[in-house]
Image (cartoon, rainbow, N blue to C red):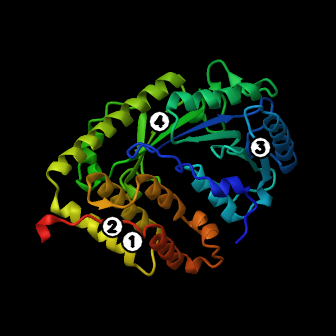
């Protein structure tokens, strides 16, 4: 199946460089709207195209971008749009975009600009190596540069105006993705979350629910952007993420010295599922890969790296796999996923348990 997305986006993954095994990714989303223009839900097609053209020209002129490319919504297939959603770790889908809406990406494959989707402009930045402050410096520089060309809607009382009043103010959402399999599988995550002191932070899983953590990934994001500064948002997010990271590390250290048979059994069963299944669905694959990452860190798995597992975790999702496997029929994806997993994880081995000899 062919894609209209540029090759560099299909060839480079956010996690292709070694990331923190517990805090693998951070994303920032900055919302902006042009002054004296209706918000996207109220725009007619002609007005939407005018806004899109103004934003496109402003962003294509950015010196911070390397080889930026613009794609109108009608240029991309539903699979292309889902690929963007997966690649940039977006939390809100945009597969049903229409004429007057569009996307801009550039060669670093870490920045995505959305046009006329909820707001006139959404700047997404995903970072796996850079910290919050460095990522924010990059994003704020881009926003400031655009503001020299276009006027953003701003009110002294409400800050930057957005289509949803609750997102006004800084109009910034900062998100931390934490991989917490020990806390989740040992059923200690709810106690850990109950002790969280940062009321400004909300918790969810990849599917948006607060109590189901697909792939043992827990997502932290600022609850408010109105009435709080960027520094306060980053402080609250960093504090919450650091506290959970330390709890996960502490529990893993305990498990290295006193492994639990039930947890080791889960890891070994997940190994069998990944290596010997004829078909694999996305949720079970992500959950099993999470256990491989935990097993590797605890010394129960070897002959593979955490980076390699991260890449497979990313590539086994629907849109990525569709292009990698060149599979046109969605009905064949479960088998294609299993075959892909078998090939990618072929070197991986279980570490023999001396107690079983």
Q: How far apart are marks 1 and 2 (CA)?
A: 12 Å
Q: Which residue is drawn at 66% across and 77% down?
A: 328
Residue 228 appears in the figure: no
Q: Mark 4 points at which residue?
A: 223
Q: Residue at x 54, y 30 (%)?
A: 225
The dot on residue 68 is: 3
Residue 195 appears in the figure: yes
Mark 4 secondary-structure assignment: loop
175 vs 349, nearest the viewer: 349
Instruction: Report the mark closest to the observer, 1 or 4.
Output: 1
Q: Residue furthest top?
A: 156
| Whether label 1 touches label 4, CB < 8 Å | no
311 vs 302, nearest the viewer: 302
Q: Mark 2 points at which residue?
A: 349
* Quadrant occupied by the N terminus: bottom right
The dot on residue 274 is: 1
Q: How far apart are marks 1 and 4 (CA)?
A: 37 Å
Q: How far apart are marks 3 and 1 (CA)?
A: 38 Å
Mark 1 secondary-structure assignment: helix
* Quadrant occupied by the C terminus: bottom left
Whole-percent x, y for residue 166 in the image: 56, 35
The dot on residue 88 is: none
Instruction: Give the mark nearer the N terminus: 1 vs 2.
Output: 1
Mark 3 secondary-structure assignment: loop
Say whether residue 181 is left or right of residue 322.
left
Q: In this view, does 133 lie above or below 354?
A: above
Instruction: Give the mark nearer the N terminus: 2 vs 4.
Output: 4
Q: Is the residue marked by circle 4 packed among few (<14), some (14-19), or many (20+) residues within 10 Å?
A: some
Say whether residue 357 is left or right of residue 289.
left
Q: Distance between the residues labelled 4 and 3?
A: 31 Å
Image quarter of residue 302: bottom left
Q: Residue at x 74, y 37 (%)?
A: 65
């Amino acid at each position: 199946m062919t894609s209209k997305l540029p090759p560099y986006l299909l060839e480079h993954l956010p996690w292709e460089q070694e990331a923190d095994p517990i805090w693998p990714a951070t994303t920032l989303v900055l919302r902006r709207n042009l002054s004296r223009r209706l918000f996207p839900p109220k725009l007619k097609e002609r007005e939407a195209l005018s806004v899109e053209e103004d934003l496109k020209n402003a962003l294509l002129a950015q010196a911070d971008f390397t080889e930026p490319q613009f794609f109108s919504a009608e240029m991309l297939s539903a699979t292309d749009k889902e690929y963007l959603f997966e690649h940039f770790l977006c939390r809100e889908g945009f597969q049903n975009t229409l004429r007057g809406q569009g996307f801009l990406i550039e060669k670093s494959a870490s920045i995505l600009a959305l046009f006329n989707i909820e707001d006139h402009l959404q700047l997404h930045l995903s970072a796996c190596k850079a910290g919050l402050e460095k990522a924010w410096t990059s994003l704020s520089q881009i926003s400031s540069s655009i503001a020299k060309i276009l006027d953003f809607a701003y009110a002294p009382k409400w800050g930057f105006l957005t289509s949803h009043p609750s997102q006004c103010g800084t109009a910034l959402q900062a998100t931390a993705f934490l991989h917490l399999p020990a806390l989740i599988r040992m059923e200690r995550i709810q106690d850990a979350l109950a002790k969280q002191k940062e009321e400004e932070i909300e918790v969810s899983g990849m599917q948006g629910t607060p109590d189901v953590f697909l792939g043992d990934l827990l997502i932290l994001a600022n609850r408010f952007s109105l009435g709080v500064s960027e520094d306060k948002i980053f402080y609250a997010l960093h504090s919450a993420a650091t506290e959970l990271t330390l709890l996960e590390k502490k529990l893993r250290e305990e498990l290295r010295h006193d492994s639990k048979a039930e947890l080791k059994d889960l890891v070994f069963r997940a190994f069998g599922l990944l290596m010997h299944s004829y078909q694999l669905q996305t949720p079970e694959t992500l959950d099993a890969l999470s256990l491989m990452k935990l097993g590797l860190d605890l010394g129960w798995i070897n002959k593979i790296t955490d980076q390699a597992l991260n890449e497979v975790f990313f590539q086994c999702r629907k849109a990525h796999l569709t292009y990698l496997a060149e599979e046109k029929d969605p009905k064949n994806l479960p088998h294609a996923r299993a075959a892909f997993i078998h090939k990618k994880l072929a070197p991986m081995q279980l570490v023999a348990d001396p107690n079983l000899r």
